Structures are given as C-alpha cells and as structure tokens.
Amino acid sequence: MSRNSKARRDARKKKQPKRPIRRLGSPIQPHAQLELADGNTVGGAGWRDGEWLTVPGSQVVARTQSAAMTLAVLRHIVALQERAGHAVKLTYSPAMETVATREAEAAGKSLEEYLLMLEQERAQRAALDDEAGDEDMPAETEDLPADRE
C-alpha cells in the first residue's frame, strides 16, 4: 500500500454522489386526510402493501387490513380533537369508502352502523383496560429494603 492510498480513497468517496434514503415497501397511496380549519393537513390514512395505515402527524401508528377500522380510528381522532376545541375535518376517498362499505355489508350493517359498532367496541376495551389498570396497581407501595452489607 502506498502512503497516499487512504487519502485517494477518501477523495474518491467525497466525489461519489450521496445515496438516497431507501424506504422499505412501496409508497403510501393517500386515501384520507385530517385537515384543520386553516387547510393544513395534520394526519390521514393510506394504503401500502396490502394494509391501511393510520398516520396522525407524520408517523404510522396503526396498520390493519380493514378500511372500516381505519375510518373508525380517524373518526375517533376527530372526536378527541373536537373535545379539545380544535376543528378537524375528515375527508376520504371513494375507494376507501367502497371497501369499508363492503366490510360493513359483510357484517350485515350499513357503513354508519358498522362504524358506530366499532367505536362502541373501542370504548368497551378502553373501559376494561382502565379497570384492569386500577386492579394491577398495588394499594400501598412497599418501601424498598435498605442496602445490605
């Protein structure tokens, strides 16, 4: 090896174009948006690799194969924001509505009835989780034993 081989190698690396960040999977196809009154988008949902993705903010927080479940989650987010005093508007694509309607019809319900049923199930699970969380908490905390020598 010559004395200058490292310097030449480093110079060659600097000249090479930077590699772009490669994302895993295909791009997300947007199908729903959560918009504030001023028109800014604060979240939404999309379709990627056979799954519906819920994206509040800029991070995927839920994945499911159910378009209706995704719509129910988005409607819940809208309700939470409205309770906090923020006007949020939910819009979604006809394709997403069609898929969700098919899911509801398979369950023998209209889309609105099915979404209400999903919201009721979510509320029941949340109530059970709250009850279980209270039972798991010890009534009194024990003091830790002093260090032993």
Image (cartoon, helix red, strand yellow):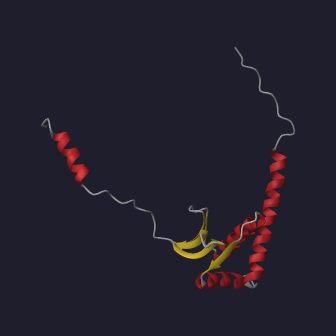
Q: Residue at x 82, y 31 (%)?
A: 142
Which residue is painted at 56% across and 62% down in the image?
58
Q: Position of residue 140 (x, y in %)?
A: 86, 36
Q: How many marks?
A: 0
Which residue sits furthest right?
Answer: 139
Residue at 67% of width from left, 84% of height from top? 101
Residue 7 picture location, percent across and down: 19, 41
Viewer-side residue, 127 vs 30: 30
Spot the residue most to the left: 2
Q: Please state the horizontal and vertical placement of residue 96, each as a whole percent of the image.
A: 61, 81
Where's residue 1, x and y in %?
A: 13, 37
Instruction: Answer left or right for 130 relative to 103.
Output: right
Image quarter of residue 20: bottom left
The residue at the far front in this view is 38
Question: Is residue 56 placed above or below 98 in the rendered structure?
Answer: above
Q: Is residue 81 above or below residue 89?
A: above
Is 123 located above or below residue 8 in the figure?
A: below
Q: Which quadrant is home to the C terminus?
A: top right
Relative height, residue 86 to residue 148 (above, below): below
Tell me if I can see residue 46 in this picture: yes
Residue 50 visible in the snapshot:
no
- Which quadrant of the figure has residue 71? bottom right
Residue at figure coordinates x 84%, y 54% from the top left: 131
